[in-house]
Amino acid sequence: MDIHEYQAKKILSDFGIGIPRGGIAYSPENAEYKAKEIGGSRWVVKAQVHSGARGKAGGIIICNDALEVARAADKLLGKKLVTNQTGPSGKIINRVYIEEASDIERELYLGLVFDRGSECIMVVASTEGGMSVEEISNKKPETIIRSKIEAAVGIQEFQAREIAFNLGIETGLISRTAEVIEGCYRAFSELDATMVEVNPLVITKDKHVLALDCKMSFDNNALFRRNDVSELRDKSQENPSEVYASDRGLNYVGLDGNIGNIINGAGLAMASMDMIKSAGGEPANFLDIGGGSNARKNCKSFQACFI
């Protein structure tokens, strides 16, 4: 399950990570009020959709007065944002995040994911913040820093400090940057996350370390014990067929092909998709209805395919 940027920032701030002052808005008038409430002379209006690369698609607007904030919110709210991650269908902007602008000195990348090969949590960092990790990997792979964290032990202070040193952080900010890395790890571990990404993690000109943009994803199978996290779900940002299926205990993933795939068992479903591909076809979906199926469940699985 993915959540919005402003929700991820609230979570990370609870773990001691600095974020710029900001607030959520659902209308132009509300956005203007939020800007005045936050204070300052420059703000950033950010479309809240489950996608990266929002800036390149026009989903992030810098404003120099409160009236500009209202106009920017009016321009974004209710519109469809199409990025290279949403596909041509795009996603509707139902809310915007108003945030004070930061004077940036350096931009860094910080991410935490599972590394299934080593069965560890992998911290990935880079001096090239503001770019997607795929771009960094392709253009400047030498800047990527990796550190494996044993889940049974957790992140150690020396590991966080080593990452900060390798990022070339100035001496006076090493401890603070290490605290941010440790805070991200605690959020990842304690909330059953599958990904925490802060991009960019910035050092401001007045020497603060802030999460300027961030994303978090969570393990759906653990949401039953994370009610505070599951309440953050925004179904309007998800595929309607996938929402319908998950609400009825089905595992559905939409694909781009034209051959339906409805199977009782994830392993058999994957094998069926492999056979379809091997025969030159393209599966239209992955749909696992699970064991112990019945007529009612089968009927709902067919309905999921045609939403």
Image (cartoon, rainbow, N blue to C red):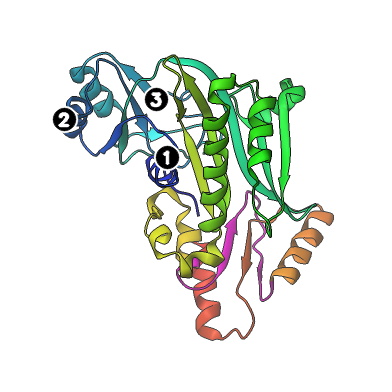
Residue at 28% from the left image edge and 23% from the top image edge: 72
Using the image, determine if residue 83 lies above or below residue 251.
Answer: above
- Residue 249 among those drawn in magenta: yes
Mark 1 falls on what kind of element? helix
Q: Evaluate if marks 3 and 2 touch, with contact meaning CB atoms under 8 Å apart.
A: no
In the rendered structure, which amino acid carries the disc numbered 2? Answer: Tyr
Q: Determine crowd level at label 2: few under 14, some 14-19, many 20+ residues with C-alpha closer than 10 A.
A: some
Q: Amino acid at mark 3?
A: Ile
**Horizontally, is 277 left or right of 244 in the view?**
right
The residue carrying mark 2 is 33
Position of residue 117 relative to residue 301, above or below, is above
Which residue is under mark 3? Answer: 60
Indicate the position of residue 284 as horizontal and vertical percent values.
64, 56
SS majority, magenta: loop
Left or right, 25 with reference to 159: left
Circle 2 — which element? helix
Q: For the point 66% across and 76% down, which residue is it?
A: 264
| 3D distance between C-alphas at marks 3 and 2 | 18 Å
Q: Nearer the viewer, mark 3 or mark 2?
A: 2
> Mark 3 Cα within 10 Å, few/some/many (few <14, many 20+)?
some
Q: Please tell me which of labels 3 and 2 falls first in the chain.
A: 2
- The spot of residue 258 in percent (x, y) is 65, 54
Specify the label residue 5 is tagged with. 1
Between 5 and 171, which is closer to the camera in this rendering? 171
Q: As shown in the figure, which amino acid type bears the numbered disc 1?
A: Glu
Q: Which residues are magenta?
A: 246-265
